[in-house]
Amino acid sequence: MLEAHSGPGIPTRAAELLDREWRLLIDGKLVPARSGATFSRVSPYTGTVIAEVPDAGPDDVDEAVRAAADARAVWRDTLPVERAKLVAELADAIERHGEELALLDTVDAGSPISNSRLDVGVTVAQLRMFAGQALELKGTTIPASTALHVTTREPVGVVARIVPYNHPLMFAGKIAAPLVAGNPTILKPPEAAPLSALRLAELAKDIFPPGVLSVVVGDGPAVPDALVRHRQVRRIGFIGSEPTGRAIQRAAAESGVKDVSLELGGKNAMVVFPDADLEAAAAGAVFGMNFTWSGQSCGSNSRLLVHQDVHDALVARVVELIEARRIGDPFDERTEQGTMINRAQYEKSLSYIDIAVSEGARVATGGGRPAGVDEGLFVAPTVFTGVRPDMRIAREEVFGPLLSVIPFADEEEAIRIANSVDYGLTASVWTADVTRAHRVARAFEAGFVWINGSSRHFPNVPFGGVKGSGVGREESLEELLSYTETKSINVMF
């Protein structure tokens, strides 16, 4: 059985952080929504209102974009190394305030405190990495004729960064690349977990010139839609679901010619051959499902493809590892899995359990609320066997702690099943055969692949997907350069 415990409550150290008036950051000032409206944030752990957050609207977006447009020339002409210094200064401020930011993510998103602290470290590292790449914003010389032909990289203009709720602070750190590249940036945090981003705005207020960074959030689609459609917003970076990504592409195209990058969903395959280290593969399957944040990750290996000869042995070990995990109070240092983000995601996961069973899948472990946890939006990590590739649970992204195990007979079938979905974000292959490992990795229709590994990201290694999983690459020099445009200059003698 899963080791579980209950008793919802917000520790004093976290409750004290919530005792404040939350504000947007626009034009260098912390302000309420122009309408005066607010919306309530309900903790997915306690079920209680923890904050009243400014409910911004199109007028607030207009003001933020105007301020960004006004700041564009000054920020563009600021030397890249000077822009990088300010981004590094924000990284230092986040590091100094790391514990409070982690507590905010835990109370706001239900993330275990250990995971929230890890996200703080990743945020700081990403900001510092992009700051350190400032001098890579360089052009080339081209020997096209006896004249001098050079290229330069210039900022695109006003940028909108729209980020999801599964790593609230870490994704708020996605402002780093556009800022270092010289673009005034408007961050739209998730309304489902905005508090750490709003606290980041407070820390950033006195670091950047007015208008260079704004943080604007509202309850519902009005704010992101206004941002995407604003004619002065030239570049949009979005992380989220595939349907929303397509809606952003449509809205952006209706209002202008814009550069849009999308990191979207996944239904990622982990393929295990019979010669693999089964103990390592079982641990990798559990780690790669990202159960720590309840499977709410686009990169989770939610399809575990296992050769029929080792299927039963691997499933047994995966179940054993999962049932030893501790789920419950996200403020407890020992907790290994927190809540779903909100009731909608909680009910979605439970509904997919019913769908999977109705289509013939069998529950090997989990299958509902964890035993002994009576409060909070918890879903037990669940493993399905008897899954066929055509089942909805094997094709549709749930964004919950549900792992489908699919048997296969040979390499050809494994590749066919792996590539049979509309997504193509991550994939992994587990085998002792080096030749087969590279052959299968090459055959995967996915943008980020591991051999005998899962879930880990690495500094400056481009992350992103193909097919329905998006366009563009993040977490790397490619991301930084994507926030620039190339200008060719021909010097004629």
Image (tube, rainbow, N blue to C red):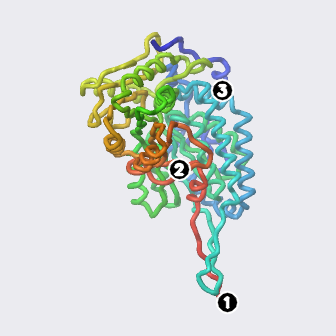
Mark whose residue sits in front, 2 or 1: 1
- x, y percentage for residue 7? 53, 11
**In the figure, is residue 153 to the left or right of 342?**
right
Quadrant in the rendering for residue 80 = bottom right
**In the figure, is residue 36 to the left or right of 203?**
left
- What residue would you read off at disc 1? 493
Q: Is residue 133 visible?
A: yes
Decide which of tag 2 and tag 1 comes sooner along the chain: 2
**In the figure, is residue 127 to the left or right of 60?**
right
- What residue would you read off at disc 2? 61
Instruction: Please state which amino acid type lies under the numbered disc 3.
Output: Leu
Quadrant in the rendering for residue 269 = top left
In the image, what residue occupies the spot 49% across and 24% down?
339
Viewer-side residue, 87 vs 427: 427
Decide which of tag 1 and tag 3 comes sooner along the chain: 3
Q: Is residue 293 visible?
A: no
Give the alpha-carbon distance from disc 2 to disc 3, as whole Å.
27 Å
